[in-house]
Image: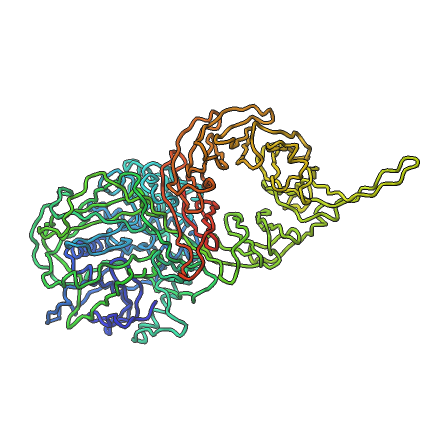
Amino acid sequence: MEALRQDDPRRFGPYTVLARLRETASAVQYLAHAATAPDAVVITAARPGLAALPAFRRRFQAEADTADRLTGDRSRPAVADDAASDAADESPDDDLLWTASPYVPALTLAEAIGTTGPLPERAVRILGAGIAETLSRAHATGAVLQGLAPRTVLLAGDGPRLTAFGPLGAAAAAEARPGGQLSVRLGYLTPEQVAGEEPGPASDLFVLGLLLAYAATGTTPLADGPAAEGAERIARTAPELGAVPEELRDLVARCLAKAPADRPSAGTVAAELALEGAAGMAKGGWLPEALAAAVAEQGARAREAVASGRPIEEPADGPVSASSGGPAKVPADAPVGTPVDAAVEGPVDAPPIEPVDTPPDAPIDTSIPAAAVPAPTPTTAPAVEPLPLPGSLPLPDTRTAQFGNLGRQVPGTDRPTTQLSVPPELTGRPAASAAAAPAPAALPAGPASAMPGGVPAVPPPMVPPVPLPVPAGRTVTSVRSSSPDADRRTLLIGLAAGAAGLVVGGGGALALSGGDGGTTDDPKPAPGHSGPTVAGLPPQPRWVYTVPAAEEAPLTAAVWNDRLLVLTGRSGATAVDLRTGRRIWENADAAEGRAALPAGKDLCFIAAPSGFLWLSPKDGKTVHQVEHAALSPSMPKLSAPEIVGSSGPVVWFTGSEKVTVKAPPPKKGKKRGKDKQVVRAYLFAYDIVRREQLWRAPVPAGRDGTPVHRLIAVREDNLVVRQSPATLAPGDVRAAKGRAVFRSFGRRTGKALWTKQFGTVAPDAAVTGDDRGLLYAAVGDDLQAFETPAGKPKWTLNGTGGTPYGTPVATGAVLHTTNRNQEVGAVERETGRLRWRRSTEAAIGTAAPAVTLSTTGRTLLAADGAQVTAFAAEDGRRLWKFQDIGTQDPKGPTVTAPYRVLTTGRTAVVQRGRIFYAFPVA
């Protein structure tokens, strides 16, 4: 709950406004009460810039009518407004819209998941049954609800409720457009909408399936991944439901069937989830204890506010959030320094998509004829469900990730845009244009998007917020109409292939014309069903973390068990929560650490100059420490290890010690020679879970002692390593004759298996191996595959002169390639046949981009000094590009650090110097 702002209205008809609850895309919602009634109500006041549009008023009214018809134990009754009919004066404010509905203590589904995580199976059943019962009533009238989203579903003490009864109430964003059009950005699409078909009752069931999976797991199927793939995921990709409870999995899968005919009816879903009905199953309580307590506390706060009868004052410690216990979220265009506190990441609304503006007479959606409509009759109608009282917004936390200006630019186009038609208005009767409505030019261009957690988004720069005028004389109510006819208007969704959103289907922009039969000010013709795309903008990062200015840039970054991003630097190790981007601990013992690996599920292993450390992932405290001298019992003078690589609980490292080699006994009559100091180097295998050495194998010493090796391949029975050319001793350099030397050791015993050179592979050439016995290496301008240990060339992929290949990545039957010409590609591992090759479109530099595959293998990310480019691994489609703008301080140093990518789960963590971005990927 938030204190009223200076320009907020204090009264709506008989209701005294007590607090600002939250902002949605189309309205501002207030907690209020009437002197003649003991209970609190929620006033939903339409934004004046939207209420001026006839299209908005009709849609607002249609959804209010739908709410009236669906009122039942899972919806809510309207509050009678006697003052509306008693008003005697008319004023310009009469054209504003507002509704009143009973306040019911509750959390939105998004807030509940953000507070405690996934719901228990029983709660999911009650939630789904309650929604399905409402859908069944809507579908019985021939309506399609299109109002389901995590933020439009309420979890009250006696069962679930809905807050939206159409696309306007569930919109992610809405704005007034030139020519009297209303642009509404949707959050969800279904396979039939992607195919250009009109949604039907089965469309609501598809979204219900998404909500059930989200409630049960905390994540939305098909939501993660590059924005440009949103439509394709919905249309073709099978949802991953492994985390959904087994008893619910089959039902959720049927709801998410691609063909509408294959989905169950709402009544079937309700019966399968709760045969006795949602209300009956919820008797005696249905929410987890923490959520039930939050709902109860919320109700108590509301009663205190009503009892005092006075507007809530600003608390001493700052304003409180508009969300109720849920995570605060910050939009991408928020000012630098806006705090984020997202404990659990829920579904994210799609990024803005340029709406399709079309004249009212465009030949689309002609199923509804144009007609004149009588003037509306004022009354009070419920447009949205009461919203929960919010909890407190945490004070700004300097340890929390900060969203900054990402400097996103629109690159060139890649593929056509898909235009999807949207059906006629759900139900209800459109009202005539209000002649007294203020001119759109005098109002703001439109509201900023309402965030899923309930925190208002920041208005666009240079557009000051416009207050809702205080009603003068009479109740400002929602508009009602009695005409059975609807006017002709155009409804289009523009789903940009390269800019689809993160929420399933990527969202879309819904453009509604003014509908008065006149012409639009926009001279553009109606779009066809294909056209140029808005090229791949990167998805909105889940969080952005910046290393504090007082600390140096990290030396290493690693992912620990898909939970933590562990950074090591000169002052110690730092852990960042991968869900929220918040720094959660620091450890000075790990200063200048060079590796961070999971030591089982309970410890984080770090190789530091002082020895090996095992840290607690909860608080970062050092649990175990082994000095170098204790790593190998027979080598008390072991040097600081150089990490080679790891697999599972085993880490391989090289180490050395200086030993004295005594001179041999002199021959008769000869003097005894001098003892010599020599360096003996070894490759070690060490189990970091059991904390013991497995084996050691001798290797040539390095130029200055300990050699540095790189892990080339890990196979079932052996591993392959290559020594870094910078650490080769002079004798080894001469013996190699300009070619790289590879060594193989048994994984279990450390026995030396072979030492080989392959073709003319240079000591510093890009090389990798696979688990099938092949080694892939850059040879001149070409890429060659060799059989190991035989050394026989298997195939050669010819390159371009002067642009050698970088280190490839093998997955499945494919090898993903990269070269200095800023090209990435895919070849068949067995034959070398090229499947595809694409340019990152970055300037040609001195090195090939580093390529990384997402955990699923579906997204290939290429990182260089200029940008990160994401491609579909299957066919090479460019999905998006990302470039940050470096330092925010104009007087600060220019950021020259290259981009690096780490992948974990459905997230790609992109690093550039001191800044880390967490992007969703497929």
Give whichever of 190, 855 is nearer the camera: 855
Quadrant where the N terminus sits is bottom left
* Picture residue at 27% right of the left edge, 44% below the top: 495
Give whichever of 669, 292 is nearer the camera: 669
Count of marks overlaid on the render: 0
Does the image show residue 546? yes
Q: Position of residue 460 (x, y in %)?
A: 28, 60
Quadrant where the C terminus sits is top left
* Picture residue at 56% right of the left edge, 29% below the top: 760
Give whichever of 449, 573 is nearer the camera: 573
The image quadrant that residue 248 belongs to is top left
Q: Position of residue 153 (x, y in %)?
A: 32, 54
* Vertical position of residue 759 compared to residue 135: above or below: above
**Residue 529 in the figure: left or right of residue 737:** left
The image quadrant that residue 712 belongs to is top right
Does the image show residue 246? no
